[in-house]
Amino acid sequence: DYLFEPVAGNIDYQSYWNDMPDCIIVGVNQATTRLSDFEFNDETYLPSQNGATFFEFISLELLPYINEKYNTTPFRIIVGHDLGANFISYYIFKEDPLFSAYIALSPEFAQETPNRLANRFEVVEKELFYYLATSDADITDLRTTIVETDNKLKNLENSKFHYNFDDFNDANHYSLVGQAIPKALNEIFRKYKPINGKEYREEVLTYSGTPFEYLEKKYDDIEYYYGFRKPVIENDLRAIAAACKKNKDDDSLGKLAKLARKTYPESMIGAYYNGLYFEAIGNYKKALQRYQSGLLLAPSQFLDKDVLLDKIYKIKEEGF
């Protein structure tokens, strides 16, 4: 109910800027059943009665329905607040966790949940993202348990477990939701984001391999973590081309040009990067041909005829 709009709004915004992929957003109406849906046994602290029924509804009915009706990947996120943030933990305890990422907003943990989470995350063999949040004005008992849980999780040494924790200032049990959701999505999709200035300086330029190898690894990681092959975006082509130029790596630039042409056959992007490559290796005749061929193709976000014409005029003026 009340979580749907904050989640949908943040996903719409971040996907618009290509900071995360488009997503299918599913909200479960619990207006009259919330307490019974999250019911658990007072001895085992696991779902019981209506809680067990709701647990199975999500896993055995809702998710299969979504997968049948829509184009999905194996990467799924579940978001919960308060009792819901405790309930989403139960999917982590399955032998094969049902979701890839869990956003727990000020959870009202059942008694054994924090210890069970720590034990599970310590040995999990599937890549899992877990985001936990509280605030300085959170409900006192909940905040105490959440901070204790953070102390159990933050030092776990398992490369498959990706953990982030936020303790917000000047926020209460409800207002922290608005701050936590974008932070959580930002962390979960950190590997997906376009190359920015910080990544370029600290990771691309310092990478032990070539710039093109860095690009290949970035997109292989996206496929590994999120379950689909993302087409290389123009922003990343520009960043890697700049690194090639800075490192005087003509071989990487040539590979980048081939990738650009393959990815964007109808755009002037391929012609532009092929022109850059031939210009870099001193074959100005072919560079001129490539730039000229791009004039007949579709412009892109960063390229238009003026950019190509500047390149063409420069080569002709310098008499190459």
Image (spheres, rainbow, N blue to C red):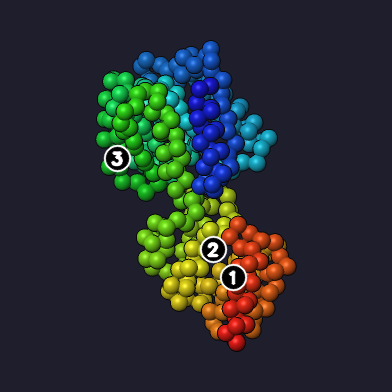
Secondary structure beneath label 3: loop
Question: Which image quadrant for residue 209?
Answer: bottom left
The residue type indicated by label 1 comes to Tyr
Picture residue at 37% right of the left edge, 49% below the top: 159
Out of 307 and 45, give the one closest to the viewer.
307
Dot 1: within a 10 Å radius of its alpha carbon, few (fewer than 14), some, or many (20 or more) residues? many
Alpha carbons under labels 3 and 1: distance apart: 44 Å
Distance between mark 3 and mark 2 Cα atoms: 36 Å
| Disc 1: which residue | 273
- Count of numbered circles on the image: 3
Locate residue 66 relative to residue 178 in the image: left or right.
right
In the image, which is nearer the foreground, mark 3 or mark 1? 1
Q: Nearer the viewer, residue 188 or 60?
A: 188
Answer above or below: position of 224 versus 2: below
Q: Which residue is mark 2?
A: 237
**Distance in Å between CA atoms under marks 2 and 1:** 9 Å
Could you say whether the residue bearing mark 1 is in a helix, strand or loop?
helix
Label 3 with label 1: CB-CB less than 8 Å: no
Q: Are marks 2 and 1 in contact (CB under 8 Å)?
A: yes
Is residue 126 in sight in this rendering?
no
Does residue 277 appear left or right of residue 206 in this picture? Answer: right
Q: Residue at x 56, y 38 (%)?
A: 12
